[in-house]
């Protein structure tokens, strides 16, 4: 997924009201950018952080910049726009770049299922059970090389796990796919201390037959694409994720 407009560097001044960020561009101008991330962005929104934003000239948009990346140092980036995760996964699914799901030849985004929910992707293929795929963008890291989900309490995430379990019981395939949007991540795990309810729901979903996959994104100021699969950490107090 290539950015529509070349990104430009800026410095974060403050993030507030979840979806707003005051920034300073390299030419000295201070403007407000849209922050497309409803989570806590723990560790990513400190004043003074080096970031990359996408300018736009759309007259329908009040804010002329969208915050896309955080520069972690050492050439590493985190993509903080959660909507990009689904776009990256859609491209990867259509191109057959996720081996565990490559046999499916029809990819339908945003399909209704469960109790008034919409699954991120419904996959179909001749002779295969339908696959319901939920994508979660992972950006939290509190230990070097280890990504964690979630970064705040997510009742919605726990509900989705229950709905995926119901799809398995109905004879379908259900997949939870963590897209780790950090190029410095070497493994991923669940932040049980942040949301124990979600951690418990994941255990129950795995017991019900929900498949858990984890992939890392390749991120540059030009594009975000699917990368390689990540190991699911087994050296943490909570061992939840197994392929």
Image (cartoon, rainbow, N blue to C red):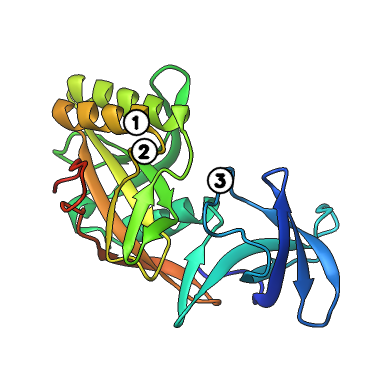
Q: Is residue 120 left or right of residue 235?
A: right
Direction from residue 146 to residue 81 in the image, left or right:
right
Q: Is residue 93 above or below residue 166?
A: below
The picture quadrant where one finds residue 240 is top left
Is residue 240 found left or right of 23 in the rendered image? left
Question: In x, y percent, where is residue 107?
Answer: 36, 46
- Residue 123 quadrant: top left
Residue identified by numbered label 1:
196
Dot 3 and dot 1 residues touching (CB under 8 Å): no
Relative to residue 28, is residue 39 depicted above or below? above
- The residue identified by callout 3 is 40
Q: Do labels 2 and 1 touch, CB within 8 Å?
A: yes
Q: Is label 3 in a helix, a strand or a loop?
A: loop
| Pointer 2 local density, CA inside 10 Å: few below 14, some 14–19, many at least 20 | few
Answer yes or no: is residue 209 visible: no
User: What kind of element bears circle 2?
Assistant: loop
Residue 232 can be seen in this image: yes
The residue shown at (20%, 54%) is 233
Q: Residue at 66%, 72% (x, y): give it.
A: 5
Query: Residue 77: x and y, percent?
Result: 48, 71
What residue appears at the point 51 percent right and 56 percent down from the top-left corner?
Answer: 84
From this view, report whether residue 5 is shown above or below residue 139.
below
Residue underneath mark 2: 193
Q: Classify mark 3: residues with Cα within 10 Å, few (<14), some (14-19) or many (20+).
A: some
Q: Nearer the viewer, residue 137 or 39?
A: 39
């Amino acid at each position: 997924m290539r950015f529509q407009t070349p990104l430009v560097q800026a410095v974060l001044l403050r993030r507030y009201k979840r979806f707003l960020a005051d920034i300073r561009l390299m030419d000295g101008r201070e403007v407000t950018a849209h922050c497309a991330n409803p989570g806590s962005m723990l560790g990513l929104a400190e004043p003074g952080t080096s970031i990359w934003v996408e300018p736009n000239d759309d007259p329908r948009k009040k804010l002329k910049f969208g915050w896309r990346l955080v520069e972690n140092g050492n050439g590493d980036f985190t993509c903080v726009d959660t909507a990009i995760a689904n776009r990256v996964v859609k491209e990867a699914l259509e191109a057959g770049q996720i081996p565990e799901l490559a046999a499916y030849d029809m990819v339908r985004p945003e399909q209704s299922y469960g109790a008034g929910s919409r699954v991120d992707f419904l996959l179909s293929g001749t002779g295969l059970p339908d696959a319901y795929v939920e994508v979660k963008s992972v950006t939290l890291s509190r230990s070097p090389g280890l990504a964690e989900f979630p970064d705040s309490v997510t009742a919605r995430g726990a509900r989705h796990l229950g709905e995926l379990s119901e799809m398995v019981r109905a004879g379908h395939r259900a997949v939870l796919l963590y897209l780790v949007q950090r190029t410095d991540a070497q493994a991923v795990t669940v932040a049980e201390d942040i949301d124990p309810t979600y951690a418990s729901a994941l255990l129950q979903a795995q017991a019900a037959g929900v498949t858990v996959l984890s992939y890392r994104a390749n991120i540059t100021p030009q594009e975000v694409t699917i990368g390689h699969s990540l190991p699911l950490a087994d050296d943490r107090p909570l061992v939840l994720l197994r392929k």
